[in-house]
Image (spheres, rainbow, N blue to C red):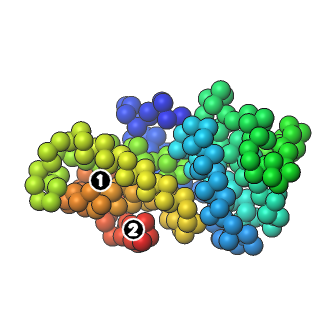
Amino acid sequence: MERELQWWKGQLASDIHQSLRIKELKLPVYRAHSPQIGMRRYFADLLAILSNRYHLCPTARHLAVYLLDLFMDHYDVAVKQLYIIALSCLLLASKFEEKEDRVPKLEQLNSLGFMCSLNLVLNKKDLIKMELLLLETFGWNLCMPTPAHFIDYYLHAAVQEGDLYNGWPLSSISKTKAFMDKYTHYFLEVSLQDHAFLNFRPSQVAAACVAASRICLQISPSWTTALHLLTGYSWDHLTQCIELMLL
């Protein structure tokens, strides 16, 4: 679901959001059983860096990390092989979320510094094999919502006319919205770094990103009735996730 489509602004936004909420209920259970879980942060950061380098949308970045998390949770994989798997997850997520011309090319990936230093080469035949293995692991289903799939819909109501800054009316709604967007996407990236966030539903993490941003921006109330109605989460539903973000 590409960012440019901006579904969250359309007439079907509520229906699409509801569909995503239903799909997240069917996501695989993450057990954090990988023997290489200590390397998980490194590879999540690597995928985030590569996503930024190739200008991939947040949904592609988050899906790539989520696919890697699920795969690592199922298999005991050598660390060196994890590089190939991580890149395969990035390519699969890119193909699913991006336009074709934005999907990283094999030659681009093979020219990366760590590929050269580790003497790794990703060829088309091996890539197809790895993608097939990944798809079989995920039951040929890549339509798995991540927090990034919800964030823009929730940002729509993240700043409102009645909000206060340090007890005073907001001096500029547009500037506050711009700061809110930056802070929320910052916390969205924070959620990639710790597998503990996989204990929450993706929509819950996205809502917590907005709440944490309102706290940091000193906007009151920290959670509004409009946000409660839009996300379906009360403040009590979010506190544990917010606390993890603000550590």
Query: Residue shown at 33%/57% (left/top)?
Result: 213
Marked residue nearer the N-terminal end (1 or 2)? 1
Q: Where is residue 210 in the image (x, y as percent from the top left)?
A: 35, 55
Q: What mark, if any, has residue 64 been given in the picture? A: none
- Residue 133 left/right relative to 37: right
Quadrant of the image containing the C terminus: bottom left
**Distance from the alpha carbon under mark 1 to that under mark 2:** 20 Å
Name the residue that disc number 1 marks. 227
Query: Residue shown at 73%/63% (left/top)?
Result: 72
Query: Residue shown at 57%/43% (left/top)?
Result: 52
User: Can you see residue 234?
Assistant: yes
- Give the number of the mark in front: 1 or 2: 2
Q: What mark, if any, has residue 246 been given in the picture? A: 2
- Residue 140 left/right relative to 130: left
As rendered, which of 225 and 176 lies closer to the eye? 176
Q: In the rendered structure, are the residues bearing label 1 and label 2 in contact, judged by CB atoms less than 8 Å apart?
A: no
Q: In this view, does 162 lie above or below 7?
A: below
Q: Is residue 176 above or below residue 42?
A: above
Mark 1 lies on a secondary structure that is helix
Query: Residue shown at 61%/37% (left/top)?
Result: 54
Q: Where is residue 164 in the image (x, y as percent from the top left)?
A: 15, 54
